[in-house]
Image (cartoon, rainbow, N blue to C red):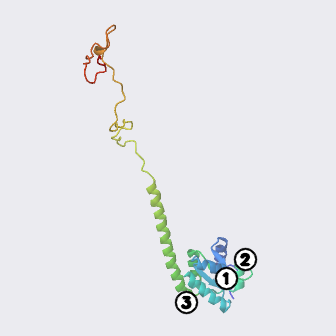
Amino acid sequence: MRAVSNDRILSLLGLALRGGRLVLGEEPVESVARARDARLILLACDAADNTRRRVRHFADAGQCLWFQIPYTKEQLGQATGRTSVAIAALTDIGLASTIAHRLAEEDPARYEESARRLDRKAARAAQRRAEQLAHEKNLRRGRRKPAQHADAAPSAVPSEAAPAPKRGTQSRTKSHPSRDHRPRPGASPYAHSRPVKKGKGSFRKKAT
């Protein structure tokens, strides 16, 4: 049995729990695994065989890694503020990779290959995050309009140009007669009119 005091791995698990990146217990681990949020499932060294089979099933469903760690259920419980913990799941790929490397330093034959696999997954996750950030940055730049400089050339079209008149519309201005054609005072208003001939269409009736 390993000493619990000042253990780096158990300290990391405690920090992960306080940061909301560690899930404890069979049902919570199953939930995050089926939701594809689990990155690494840890199993206590003294867990039962049935618990080990369930952990393997959770890892297959969530497509994540799992391995048995050299800590008892009691030690995991003390590190996470519980009485006993048999199953735990890390939901952060960075923490999962760090813990795997810490375990590989002490037992390379058992944990080194898993640490490498987690490194590759962490690199792909970091690349996806970088691509997402770059995409969001490009979207923000695309929505912004370029600022117009003070020495920019003025627009060729005047801003207060009058709109062109529509087709078919007539001018509403009233035409006034010139002074030469206005009737003089005292003159007959019908002086310039033509006489109406009698005949067909005349308004005068013929004498019977």
Quadrant housing the N terminus: bottom right
Q: Residues within 10 Å of mark 1 (few under 14, many from 20)?
A: some
Does 128 sit left or right of 37 as displayed? Answer: left
For marks 3 and 2, give the CA distance: 31 Å
Task: Work out whether residue 65 can be spotted.
Answer: no
**What amino acid type is highlighted by mark number 2?**
Gly
Task: Look at the numbered disc 1 and give the secondary structure of its residue.
Answer: helix
Residue at the extreme front: 208
Please give the residue where the numbered disc 1 appears in the rendered image: 26
Mark 3 sits on what residue? 109
Residue 19 pos. (x, y %): 64, 70
The residue sitting at 67% across, 75% down in the picture is 14
Specify the farthest residue to the bottom: 49
Q: Earlier in the sequence, mark 3 or mark 2?
A: 2
Q: Dot 2 corresponds to which residue?
A: 81
Q: Nearer the viewer, residue 206 or 163?
A: 206
Select label 2 or label 1 by which is in front: 1
Give the secondary structure at mark 2: loop
User: Which one is in front, 199 or 172?
Assistant: 199
Kind of residue indicated by mark 1: Glu
Q: CA distance from mark 2 to mark 1?
A: 16 Å
In the picture, the quarter occupied by the C terminus is top left
The residue lying furthest to the top in this view is 186
Residue 65's image quarter? bottom right
| Residue 11 on image: x %, y % | 66, 76
